[in-house]
Amino acid sequence: MAKPITVLCLSSAVKGQRLIRELKNLGCRVFLLTEERWRGDEWPYESLEGIHYMHSLANRQHVINAASYMARGLQFDLIIPLDEYEVQTAGALREHFVMPGMTASEAQPFNDKLAMRVRAQAAAIPTPEFTPVFNYDRLRDWMARVPPPWLLKPRHEAGAMGIKRCDDAEQVWRWLDRLGDEQSRRLLERFVPSDVFHVDALVWQGQIVFSVACAYGRPPLSVSHGGGVFTTRTLPPEDEDAQTLTALNARVIAALAPPGFSGAVHAEYLRTLDDGRWLFLEAGARVGGANIADMIEYATGVNLWAEWARIEVARFCGDGYAPPAARRDHGGILICLARQEYPDLSGYDDPEVVWRLKKRYHAGLILTSPDAGRVQALLNAYAQRFAVDFLTRAEPWETGRLV
């Protein structure tokens, strides 16, 4: 009998349960390295050989030390990061253990907002105007040339975490003074009023084998900083926007990914309101958050987490991979912070409702239908009702690392 594949999963958030279960179904021995605050949370314990806890996964050297301690009794074959923050850390671990797979340097364009913009720019892929925060003369010249407002962005945070809007140069300098030695870990970018889209894809040996283009309702930055109901929906594949996004996404992955890359990619794009230009915003070598993978599964039958597990095992074993055949239904999701600890969603009873979020102080639904227009209409109506029935607001975290 062949020796089972031993997998180390890293995560500073509770996610990736389907990936862990699929790895177990494929005969792997799965170990999890996560943070102490998630002890006793909703992990698939029946699919795990062991869980090791740390106070924090933020310090890369501490993670290397912890994994090396685990490796005294285990021989890891695969290392898989479940969250944005661990993508480069997993690469550093592969380098440390001299294992195959994406290194920390190869992962940087998927994790560092400055690096991904520089790569995209070199490949003639349009992005919002930006500048690094290194040289002050260059920064002054950029602010004199590019009109505000600007966004001061952390290079390594996920989504809208830690982003500061600046309406003049004085605000920029005040934030940089507060950041001190951390300021070089930022970039300054022109704020471009836009509609925001995302594409979620599976890649096998450098080729995109499955992708779904989606349109957010309100931009995620607006929701996270101003409050509101988060929504997104799948776009019909024949839609002109979906076709444009699919082609642009292929160029982005080719520009960012190392040769022969295999895995999952979540990428975001802007369509400017003033002139309809398409701009690349950011991409991660991971499955998208906010239950987007669940929405895609209900619409297509393809679970991105489970397929990512299959891709990792096939790559390790030298086997082939093909995604399952996909349905062509349309899906939408809406989520908000709720005033109630356990919101009552029973009044949202249209037959298109296929999933209800079970999370304290959150309300959420997934809708599916063969009719894209029906999904859009329900999302609009339900978002208005959510605002009355449940919606509350919390101050945005400065970093995804906070408890």
Image (cartoon, rainbow, N blue to C red):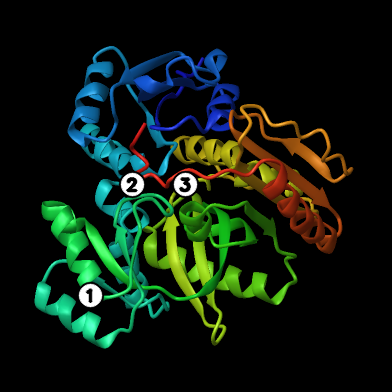
- SS class, disc 3: loop
In the rendered image, is residue 183 in sight? yes
Quarter of the figure with the C terminus: top left
Residue 379 position (above or below residue 83): below
**What's the residue type where badge 2 is placed?**
Glu
Q: Where is residue 267 drawn, in percent x and y?
A: 49, 59
* 313, 340: nearer the viewer: 340
Is the residue under label 3 in contact with that under label 1 (CB below 8 Å)?
no
Residue at the spot 59% in from the left edge and 41% down from the top edge: 307
* 223, 116: nearer the viewer: 223
Residue at the spot 54% in from the left edge and 87% down from the top edge: 275
- According to the picture, the residue beneath numbered tag 1 turns out to be 169
Q: Nearer the viewer, mark 1 or mark 2?
A: 1
- SS class, disc 1: helix
**What's the residue type where badge 3 is placed?**
Arg
Q: Earlier in the sequence, mark 2 or mark 3?
A: 3
Residue at the spot 22% in from the left edge and 75% down from the top edge: 169
Q: Give the alpha-carbon distance from disc 2 to disc 3, as whole Å.
A: 22 Å
Q: Earlier in the sequence, mark 1 or mark 3?
A: 1
Residue 46 position (above or below residue 119): above
Q: Where is residue 93 drawn, in percent x and y?
A: 26, 35
Q: Nearer the viewer, mark 2 or mark 3?
A: 2
Residue 119 position (above or below residue 87): below
- According to the picture, the residue beneath numbered tag 2 turns out to be 398
- According to the picture, the residue beneath numbered tag 3 turns out to be 286
Q: Is residue 62 left or right of residue 26?
A: left
